[in-house]
Image (tube, rainbow, N blue to C red):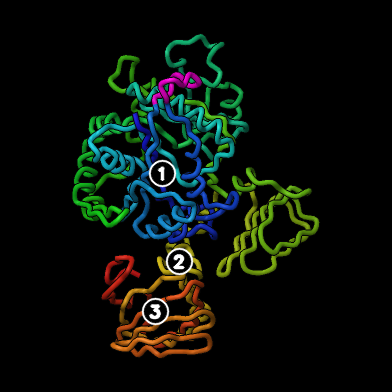
Amino acid sequence: MYLQPLILAGGSGTRLWPLSREHYPKQLLSLAGEHTLLQNTAMRLDGLPIHEADDSRVPSNPILGIRAPLIICNEDHRFLVAEQLRQVDREPAGILLEPMGRNTAPALTLAALAAQQGGDDALLLVMAADHVIKNVAAFHSAVIQAAGLAGDGMLVTFGIKPDRPETGYGYIRTGEPVGGAAAADTAGQPRRLAAFVEKPDTETAQAYLDSGDYLWNSGMFMMRAAVWLEAIAHFQPAMAEACRLTYASGRADGIFRHMGRPEMAACPSDSIDYAVMEKLSAEAVDQTAAYQAAVVPLDAAWSDVGAWSSLWDISVGDENRNVVSGDVYCHDTHDSLLVAEHRLLATVGIDNIVVIETPDAVLVARKDRAQDIKHIVQRLKQEQREEHRTHRRVYRPWGSYESLDMGQRFQVKRLTLKPGAAISRQLHHHRAEHWIVVSGTARVTRGEEQFLLSENESAFIPVGATHRLENPGKVPVEIVEVQSGSYLGEDDIVRFEDNDRREREEP
């Protein structure tokens, strides 16, 4: 049976604000090394063993081959996701685009429908795009264990062996060993899923750790695509039907598949745990039920990087246990996470804090209150501020732009066009633009004329003029753009031609 990896990349990571934003969430950030969390998730599949007829090393391994991963993400992130995978030479089997979030159960259902388009069944390995797993060999071993169970029709989840009384995670209570093995022989072996348990207080978490019967809920799963589709239709028939209509009404666009917007808006929202897995726990069903669930223990230095304190936990600190990034000076500072993106950050006489500096926002918090940053993001949303949505630097398929200054009727931006890239042919109803090339050579289309601009040369684009900017060279082009007019919003745009096939009014 073939393994079909599925990477769920639709989260927003609000507790890692201000680095993680709605339009550039944590899975797209390099938080735990050179590569982004999404890239590391895709690369984690490298070296996973497959079954061969004469291979006796893993006799229970039913995996005959591994397909390229399916990605499911927010429609707004599609070009960023595709570009990050291209950077690490990973070609996805497809990228399924959600017009709005409906949690993980609909996402998995849409992916299962996509995986069955070839006409055969597959083992789905469901991974979140924003996790850190340092022991990849242990992860591979757990995947092989899970594959044997999932191949036999079980729905499998991965439980993380706890190493501390963590109050920020949900837990799984484990039951009897799968297959009835003696308890002495089951260290690290799969067990029945007894129950899901909500996030505990500190005293309860310590009791869970002491008992040895509880694992952290990882949010990773494995099951056959056909088994999941049968289970979701049984337990959540309205969701199953809505997902079927959503997928059927979608349209292909290269490696992307756009889902039907009205159909997905009508789909119930729920997690994999609540929609199906909790209904399969030993507390809910008996051993002879039609669908069976198991837990595979995973001890692989895992973290969901759910808060800044989690990043401090998995990072290597200095002699004072400070984790620093950027231009940071510390004096008499201990056990802190300090990140400077834009300017010098200096601390004196502080302990156990988080300071995250970005060009447009600075966060200062006690490390033990890192989970509460979501309240800041909620307030920013309520007040309709842009800081929860975007950074000052905004990424586009052609490169990026950064706002440098803004007044009542003007805005100054810095544009960076990648080699060979082009913005769409477009016009604006309310603003004029003045482009000054700082480095590189740009090709400008203005109405019917076309010309090149080199360093220190400029061009004026009047209100209502059709225009396009391209980089015909092999190095990035840097441009200062001065906008002036009565309205400077990004939605003042009408597209006529776009290499990236965006909608006419899409920013």
Q: Quadrant of residue 484?
A: bottom left
Answer whether residue 57 is magenta in the image. Answer: yes
- At mark 2, the secondary structure is strand
In front: mark 2 or mark 3?
3
Q: Is the residue 500 above or below the residue 268 in the image?
A: below
Name of the residue lying farthest toward the right: 332
Residue where numbered disc 1 is placed: 7
Q: Is most of the magenta stretch helix, strand or loop?
A: loop
Magenta residues, start to end: 52-62
Q: CA distance from mark 2 to mark 1?
A: 22 Å
Q: Position of residue 488 (x, y in %)?
A: 39, 81
Which residue extends farthest front? Answer: 54
Q: Locate the N terminus by quadrant.
A: top left
> Which residue is located at x 31 percent, y 14 percent?
288
Instruction: Tell me the CA gap for discs 3 and 1.
Output: 34 Å
Residue at 33% of width from left, 83% of height from top? 467
Which comes sooner in the sequence, label 2 or label 1?
Answer: 1
- Horizontal side of 279 relative to 454 (left or right) equals left
Measure the alpha-carbon separation of dots 2 and 3. 16 Å
Looking at the image, which residue is at 76% across and 54% down? 333
Residue 163 vs residue 70, the one in the foreground: 70
